[in-house]
Image (tube, rainbow, N blue to C red):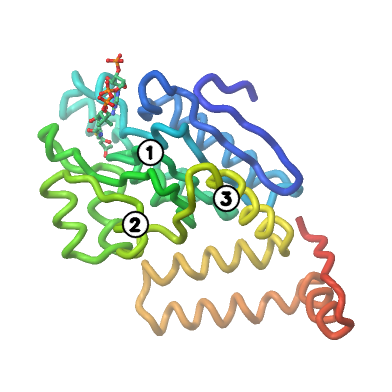
């Protein structure tokens, strides 16, 4: 599929998606969100791909949903079309996604990063939910996923004041998995994605599903889900290969990708 707002590069086991509206600081319009969802769906359907990386430019991962596109939206239109609901497709992607964030990740940009499974940030990254300054609130998970990531106190602070949080603060708050110098950002994210992509797809996809369950169900339910998923992996050739390789002191060659 030809894309206009993103660049897509298929590597060994990794799909790299680069947001490409730099003149608008990668503001997320409907076309771009549709294209990101389509590219991630392509990755889900491609057995050679095990993980994706979503990145932006050095100046901005994404400075939010496109304000110019939203400005004239009415409530009936927004409600009837269920504006922003389609963005959830990204969170439903089954293979792991790494957000490689440099510069601004604001509003919908921060929410897009939070829909990914791991956020790796450059030391230049700035996260925030400034929607309140526009007379609205976050609409793609900023009041929900942010609370899970950083807790109520900091989420409330960010959502109500609209202030930005530097990479270091985002890491210590738990939003970000790693902070690296900006020049190392893409290589670090691609290395991590490549490592994930070389594993058994069944195992990485089950791991993603199981971790995400922790946000949705009570502990006993989550533990039962985890146990069943764990048990089911003993039906895969990759489990046999992984354990045999350990015993034979060689690296595993997983096949289910
Ligand atoms: N939507 C549309 N255009 C945007 C944009 C956005 N979210 N963010 C930046 N741009 C555009 C600017 O309009 C400008 O375009 P022009 O050159 O055509 O004027 C261009 O990108 C560069 O931006 P600035 O000149 O403003 O750059 P700056 O360095 O002075 O400021 C910034 C950078 C602080 C990020 C500032 O652009 C900014 O505050 N952007 C908006 C951030 C924001 O409010 N995001 C939340 C959006 S609402 C949302 O996301 C809702 C939701 O949850 C669904």
Q: Which residue is mark 3?
A: 189
Tag 3 secondary structure: helix
Whichever of callouts 2 and 1 sits on the residue coming sooner in the sequence is: 1
Q: Of discs 3 and 2, which sits in the foreground?
A: 2
Whether 26 is drawn above or below 186: the answer is above
Dot 3 alpha-carbon crowd within 10 angstroms: few under 14, some 14 to 19, many 20 or more: many
Q: Residue at x 56, y 47 (%)?
A: 184
Instruction: Check residue 193 in the rendering and tell me which mark sits there, or answer none.
Output: none
**Quarter of the picture holding the C terminus:** bottom right
204 relative position to 66: left or right: right
Q: Which residue is mark 2?
A: 168
Out of 42 and 107, give the one closest to the viewer: 107
Out of 80 and 209, give the one closest to the viewer: 209
Dot 1 alpha-carbon crowd within 10 angstroms: few under 14, some 14 to 19, many 20 or more: many
User: Label 3, label 2: how many angstroms apart (C-alpha)?
Assistant: 17 Å
Q: Name the spot of residue 117 as percent of width and height, x first.
A: 48, 56
Q: Name the spot of residue 73 as percent of width and height, x first.
A: 20, 23
Q: Residue at x 23, y 44 (%)?
A: 129
Q: Name the spot of residue 240 as percent of width and height, x first.
A: 82, 77
Query: Mark 3 near mark 2, Cβ–Cβ under 8 Å?
Result: no
Out of 114 and 255, give the one closest to the viewer: 114
Instruction: Check residue 103 in the rendering and tell me which mark sits there, or answer none.
Output: 1
User: Label 2, label 1: how many angstroms apart (C-alpha)?
Assistant: 13 Å
Q: Quarter of the image holding residue 72?
A: top left
Whichever of callouts 3 and 2 sits on the residue coming sooner in the sequence is: 2
Tag 1 secondary structure: loop
121 relative position to 139: left or right: right
Q: Quarter of the image holding residue 8?
A: top right
Tag 2 secondary structure: helix
């Amino acid at each position: 599929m030809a894309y206009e707002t993103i660049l897509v590069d298929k590597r060994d086991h990794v799909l790299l998606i680069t947001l490409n509206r730099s003149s608008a600081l990668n503001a997320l319009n409907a076309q771009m969100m549709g294209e990101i969802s389509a590219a991630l769906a392509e990755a889900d359907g491609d057995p050679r791909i095990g993980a994706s990386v979503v990145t932006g430019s050095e100046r901005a991962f994404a400075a939010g949903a496109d304000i110019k596109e939203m400005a004239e939206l009415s409530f009936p239109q927004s409600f009837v079309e269920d504006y922003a609901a389609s963005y959830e497709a990204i969170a439903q992607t089954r293979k792991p996604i790494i957000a490689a964030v440099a510069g601004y990740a604001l509003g919908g940009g921060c929410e897009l990063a939070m829909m990914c499974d791991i956020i790796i940030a450059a030391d230049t990254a700035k996260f925030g939910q400034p929607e309140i300054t526009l007379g609205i609130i976050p609409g793609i998970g900023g009041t929900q996923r942010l609370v899970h990531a950083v807790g109520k106190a900091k989420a409330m602070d960010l959502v109500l004041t609209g202030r930005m949080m530097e990479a270091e603060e985002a890491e210590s708050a738990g939003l970000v998995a790693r902070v690296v110098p900006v020049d190392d950002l893409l290589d670090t994210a691609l290395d991590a994605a490549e490592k994930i992509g070389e594993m058994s797809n069944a195992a990485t996809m089950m791991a993603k599903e199981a971790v995400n369950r922790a946000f949705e169900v009570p502990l006993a339910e989550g533990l039962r889900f985890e146990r069943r998923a764990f048990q089911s992996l003993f039906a895969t050739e990759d489990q046999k290969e992984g354990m045999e390789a350990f015993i034979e002191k060689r690296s595993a060659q997983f096949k289910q990708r």
